[in-house]
Amino acid sequence: MTDEEKITTVKTLCGNDEEATDALVSVYLAKAEAAIYRRRYPFGLPSNPRMPEEYDMLQCELASRYFFRRGGEGEVTHSENGISRVYGSVNDEDLLMEVIQVARF
């Protein structure tokens, strides 16, 4: 998936929210890529890491999750105006468990 396709995918996952600008989505995609790399290469990154294609959609899902959580980063619960939200995981372990770790490269 190209970077443009990833941006389009994240915007779609975010319901084409007008606040989901290309620049903001790109930042969240970079953050998601870093999280995947940290999980995939726990003993240090190779000299030229490349995102495996099988993690493209995972990267988009993480980026959309970051978008929806902006302003409440690190919160486990949130209540406002009678609406309560409880986040199952603030470390995104439920998604990152899909990443297969590499011990040697």
Image: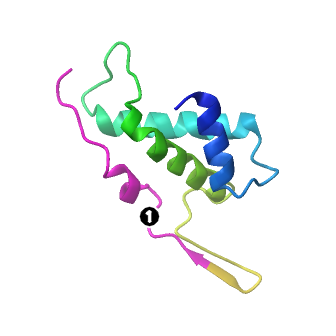
In the rendered structure, the answer to whether residue 31 lies left or right of residue 83 reads: left
Q: Position of residue 100 (x, y in %)?
A: 25, 41
In the depicted structure, whether residue 48 falls above or below residue 83: above
Is residue 91 part of the magenta span, yes or no? Answer: yes
User: Is the C terminus in the top left, top right, bottom left or bottom right quadrant?
Assistant: top left
- Residue receiving disc 1: 89
Q: Is residue 88 magenta?
A: yes
Tell me if residue 35 can be seen.
yes
Side of 5 relative to 55 (left or right):
right
On the image, the x and y values in percent for residue 20 come to 75, 47
The structure residue drawn at horizontal position 52% and vertical position 51%, both measured from the top left corner, is: 61
Element carrying mark 1: loop
Farthest-out residue, left: 104
How would you rate the neighbour count of disc 1 (Cα within 10 Å): few for under 14, some for 14-19, many for 20 or more?
few
**Position of residue 87 measured from the top left corner of the image (x, y, whole percent):** 51, 70
Which SS type dominates the magenta stretch?
Answer: loop
Query: Is residue 41 left or right of 54 when viewed as pictured?
Result: left
Q: Is residue 27 visible?
A: no
Judge by depth and name the residue closer to the eye, 55 or 74. Answer: 55
User: What color scheme is it?
Assistant: rainbow
Number of numbered discs present? Answer: 1
State the residue at coordinates (77%, 82%).
81
x 69%, y 56%: residue:
71
Please state which amino acid type lies under the numbered disc 1: Ser
For the view shown, which residue lies furthest in the bottom direction? 82
Residue 88 higher or lower than 45, as above or below: below
Residue 40: which quarter of the image? top left
Q: Is residue 38 above or below residue 78?
A: above
Q: Residue furthest right?
A: 18
Q: Residue at x 61, y 35 (%)?
A: 5
Q: Can you give x and y, in whole percent of width and height, for residue 34 in the image? A: 46, 34
Q: What are the residue bounds of the magenta stretch? A: 85-105
